[in-house]
Amino acid sequence: MKFDYKKIERMTPAMRIIHWANAICMIAAIITGLYIAHPYYQSFIAEGAVDKYVMAWNRWVHFISAIIFDVTSIVVVYLYFFSRFEKPYRKLIPNAKNVKEFGEVVLNLLTLNRRKRFDSTHSDSFNTTYFTIFHLLLFFMLFTGLQLYVHGLESGESSIGAWWPAFLHITTDWTIPVTGGTLMDVRIAHHITMWLIIVWIVFHIYYQIWRTIFWEEGDIAIVFGGSKFVKDKE
Amino acid sequence: MAEGRDESIKKLFDAKSAKVNTNRGEEYFADLYVKCQKRLGELKAMPATGGGVDLRKVLEEDGFERRDFLKWASATTAMLMLPASFTPLVAEAAEVMNRIPVVWIELSDCAGNSEALLRSDGPKIDEIVLDIISLEFHETLQAAAGHQAEKQLEEALELFRGKYILFVEGAIPLGIDGNFGTLGAKAETFKDHLLRLADGAAAVVAVGSCATYGGIPAAAPNPTDAVGVMDIVKGKPVINIPACPANPANIVGVVLHYALTGSVPELDSLLRPKFAFGYRIHDNCERRAHFDAGEYVEEWGDEGAKNNFCLYKMGCKGPMTFNNCSIIRYNESVNWPIGVGRGCIGCSEPDFWDKYAYERPMANAHIKAPTGGVERTVDQFGLGLLTAAGIGIGIHAAASVMAGKKNSDEKDA
């Protein structure tokens, strides 16, 4: 049997930039976050304290990657609803069509590609739901992380003005009662959520590679070149 | 009902607004100065109630010069976040503090806060000032016992009704109808006792972490259902001075503030005075430079410990604890936990015994699974999740490879 392949645009350049910005920030945040939680390497004891700034640099990288995340998160929320390319929120509405597609994609995964009864040209509702879970985890990380950050701004002042700590208190103080009532609970929740995100990443990478191999539609190319190829039976 | 809900929603959104406003402008302080002067004049006109002890005389007898006292007064003024011009007023307030009747009760506690006041190597000015307050009732300190003590309490409650400050040390057990702790011949439960005494008080001050949040009696599994004062006493100003033990300087600070202004100091959402609990230990820690440099004590007595390195890896909870002990220290600035080379255990935060005091970094903290039974460290849970995901993926990948082979076999055939 011979197929013709049809090229399908799946990710715009902006979406791909956001994806890789997120991926790099994620790795940076995990490496530095693990250090902040429990410094796992030592600095040279013979060197003077003024010459090394190990924890401070780790925290700096952690905060910078967090702030990039903040910005991409806002952009992603916007794109979920107003993207001219595709509007992911439509795939999240639990209507009959989406629920059926979700089930079919799960069955495809569980039957090891023996059964494939859905349209794989567009982003399916299973993957969209999976990405949404990631964004929700990420939002939780942002709110708990900024709550931990504002503890260092007790004076109510910051280099960009008094509005910033006040804003952080208004937007993140709810994380204290929600996680268990103490500042330590916020910290533990922040750390545990990191592990959930790591698990999320592991499955995400596996699943995209698995699709590429078994669907034979070049899915892995989406995130690099922006497009995949589907068999066009003629 | 609606108000209660509004309150709880409000609480959800400003659970811990730690903003400390130290500069309220000249006009505010000028007003406050006049108000304080008036208040002190009123107090001076009142007779001293606690046997009329003269602070100047007591200080002299203990070997403190007037200059020492004024140095203490200016330090206390700074601690209360008042301008330096208030120093004479603070000194005056300390001298007339014996006009304010205080009733001090102990519930589920170890008397550690009282002990902290009494057992220092020599009386510090903070402690002397507390000694001369008009202590109308204090189970541990008074000579009276039994029916005599009860009679003394009743008289004090009657005489100073609506005027006394009630200091509470210790948690309140609520289990088996509060019968885990009873007082006196009538076996009055701690809860009833507290409510009865709080009823006639001008304000209630919870001293120490047990009185504030339940503290160690309330630590898991909290067999007596212990709670703090603020969970029981409603409709009265409650001031919390947590820490284990509460710093005498902060206790004096609160009484002084009351003597000076006739009102309670500004409180945070956990009802702790902001002048004492507005700042994080970590941000004023003398070892903070070692934290930023990545220089940590790896084990007790190592080279790092000898060089005063940061105690973060030994489980110091300074980064999550709001208290002023890194600034004012204990026993008139003699020393404090980090200074003696051991980490902070977060004793001024809620649930500190369960959530802060495990002397390990947070990543190694033991937490319970949602099911309750299993207890592992945070990182062990995370690695467990990752392992489960890895095994699942491994099985799926292996199965896919076999199924894939089958498919291509079919194709070939």
Image: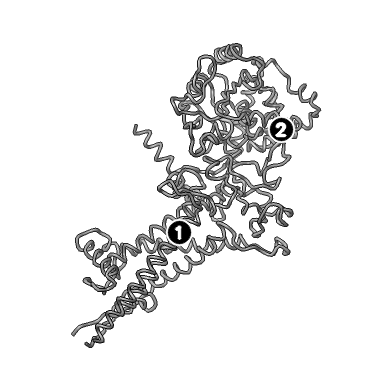
B22 versus A217 height, above or below: above
Is there a contact, CB below 8 Å, between mark 2 and mark 1?
Answer: no
Give the structural element (helix, strand or loop) at label 2: helix
How many residues crowd mark 1 within 10 Å: few (<14), some (14–19), many (20+)? some
Give the structural element (helix, strand or loop) at label 1: helix
Q: Nearer the viewer, mark 2 or mark 1?
A: 1
Badge 2 amino acid: Ala
Q: Residue at x 56, y 53 (%)?
A: A158
Q: Nearer the viewer, residue A192 or B220?
A: B220
Q: Residue B246 occupies which quadrant of the picture?
A: top right
Q: Which residue is mark 2?
A: B73
What x and y, as percent, mark residue B188?
A: 50, 18
Q: Which residue is mark 1?
A: B384
Is B6 displayed left or right of A59 in the figure?
left
- Chain assignment, label 1: B
Residue that sits furthest to the bottom in the current view: A2
Q: Nearer the viewer, residue B83 or A226?
A: A226
What x and y, as percent, mark residue A66?
A: 49, 61
Q: Residue at x 70, y 56 (%)?
A: B304
Quadrant of the rendering where the C terminus of chain A is positioned: bottom left
Q: Nearer the viewer, residue A80 or A213?
A: A213
Of callouts 2 and 1, which one flags the residue occurring earlier in the amino acid sequence? 2
Q: Residue B143 occupies which quadrant of the picture?
A: top right
Is A170 displayed left or right of B59 in the figure?
left
B125 versus B288 height, above or below: above
How many residues crowd mark 2 within 10 Å: few (<14), some (14–19), many (20+)? many
What x and y, as percent, mark residue B250?
A: 63, 34
- Chain assignment, label 2: B
Badge 1 amino acid: Gly
Q: Residue at x 71, y 30 (%)?
A: B119
